[in-house]
Amino acid sequence: MNTLIVYAHPGHTGHHGYLLDQLKTVLDNKNIIYEVLDLYALSFDPILKAEELGLRGNYKISKDVERYQEKIKKADKLIFIYPTWWQGLPAILKGFFDRVFSAGFAFEYKNGLPVALLKGKTAAVFSATGGPKIINKFIVGDRGMKVIVKNILGFCGIKTKGFSIGSARTLTDNHKKQIITMVSSMVSYLYK
């Protein structure tokens, strides 16, 4: 069993870094093999190039994107960790989805209908937002989370569950407790 963690936050000292550290500790204790793709540390280029437009027919996938696609192919489990900014995901993560989850790899169209190509994989998605969770969930409708869970990963056939924390402006002891509980729930969900 292989797990790929995609970390899309420029820092490591707040909620997202704490969750990543707790997650790594739990996975290490369970002897689960994983790899972390830290998109900012890797200086991942989120800009989709014209030649990468998969639905245009004649397209070219770069070597770096092929490497990421190979890692996703090998992974049974995927974990995405990112902040919710402006009710959405950071540009670097959006660019990762645009470039890596391309037509012919993550999905295709047959007879005009979409066909998911990444079935059999399971994912957990974690995000923290500065706004209160109740507003994000009930007034805004958890837009950012839905885009990844349903519109991207679900579209590609990946069974996904989202986890989030609100009012995440300062990492408090209460948030640390919530994150530890959330990591336990994520691991239970992924490794039933």
Image (spheres, helix red, strand yellow):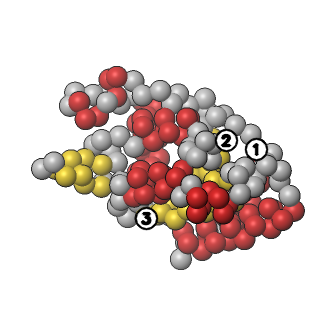
Residue type, label 2:
His
Q: Which residue is mark 3?
A: 159
Q: Secondary structure at mark 2?
A: loop
Packing grade of label 2 (10 A; few <14, some 14-19, many >=20) is many
Whole-number angstrom distance, CA of label 2 to CA of label 3: 23 Å
Q: Residue at x 55, y 72 (%)?
A: 189
Whole-number angstrom distance, CA of label 1 to CA of label 2: 7 Å
Q: Residue at x 48, y 35 (%)?
A: 95
Q: Residue furthest bottom?
A: 192
Mark carried by residue 9: 2
Q: Secondary structure at mark 3?
A: strand
Circles 1 and 2, Cβ within 8 Å, touching? The answer is yes
In the displayed structure image, the side of residue 185 where residue 172 appears, left or right: right
Which quadrant of the view contains residue 178?
Answer: bottom right
Packing grade of label 3 (10 A; few <14, some 14-19, many >=20) is many
Mark carried by residue 12: 1
Which quadrant of the view contains residue 59?
Answer: top left
Whole-number angstrom distance, CA of label 3 to CA of label 1: 27 Å
Residue type, label 1:
His
In the displayed structure image, the side of residue 41 where residue 168 appears, left or right: right
Q: Secondary structure at mark 1?
A: loop
Label 3 or label 1, whichever comes before in sequence order: 1
Q: Position of residue 51 (x, y in %)?
A: 32, 23
